[in-house]
């Protein structure tokens, strides 16, 4: 699991899951209050593993006539839900965060 870049406090598994499920919101460190944002690589990787890979797998099976999608729809749906659950359980160990320093420097004081 990743730790805070300022104080090395480890992020909680629950806060990482919440961050990713609710639009990749930032995580605020519990000890130093620094805001950490999800990296772009993590966003691309999660969407690729959760959605794109199962879709490609099914398309290959359909094109090779190995399965008829109408006969195995519910099995595919269940398998896809199990796949997403597995990805979700493993995701916090691979999710990477960073601090955006540019936001603080661009604030204009009135």
Image (cartoon, helix red, strand yellow):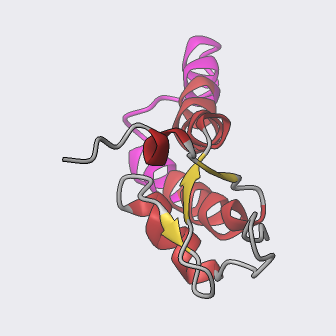
Asked whether 63 or 52 is in front, the reply is 52
Instruction: Give above or below for 66 relative to 46.
Output: above
Instruction: Give above or below for 100 relative to 68.
Output: below
Asked whether 23 or 70 is in front, the reply is 23
Q: Total number of numbered labels?
A: 0
The answer, for residue 72, to whether it is visible in the render is: no
| Quadrant placement of the N terminus | bottom right
Identity of the residue drawn at 77% across and 65% down:
93
Identity of the residue drawn at 51% across and 68% down:
27
Name the spot of residue 31 as percent of width and height, x first: 63, 87
Is residue 71 highlighted in magenta? yes
Name the spot of residue 106 as percent of width and height, x first: 40, 37
Instruction: Farthest residue to the bottom: give it.
Output: 31
Name the spot of residue 24 as percent of width and height, x first: 44, 53
Quarter-of-image position of residue 84: bottom right
Instruction: Farthest residue to the front: give it.
Output: 110
Name the spot of residue 65 as percent of width and height, x first: 59, 17
Is residue 88 toward the left or the right of residue 26 in the image?
Answer: right
Quarter-of-image position of residue 12: bottom right
Identity of the residue drawn at 57% across and 46% down:
101
The answer, for residue 57, to whether it is visible in the render is: yes
Asked whether 20 or 34 is in front, the reply is 34
Instruction: Farthest residue to the left: give it.
Output: 110
Q: Which residues are magenta?
A: 57-78
Is residue 26 toward the left or the right of residue 109 in the image?
Answer: right
Is residue 2 highlighted in magenta? no
């Amino acid at each position: 699991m990743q730790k805070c870049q300022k104080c090395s406090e480890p992020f909680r598994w629950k806060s990482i899951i919440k961050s990713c499920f609710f639009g990749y919101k930032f995580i605020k460190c519990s000890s130093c209050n620094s805001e950490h944002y999800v990296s772009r690589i993590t966003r691309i990787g999660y969407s690729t593993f959760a959605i794109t890979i199962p879709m490609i797998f099914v398309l290959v099976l359909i094109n090779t006539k190995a399965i008829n999608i109408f006969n195995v729809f519910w099995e595919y749906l269940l398998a896809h839900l199990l796949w997403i659950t597995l990805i979700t359980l493993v995701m916090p160990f691979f999710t990477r965060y960073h601090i955006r320093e540019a936001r603080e420097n661009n604030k204009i004081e009135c």
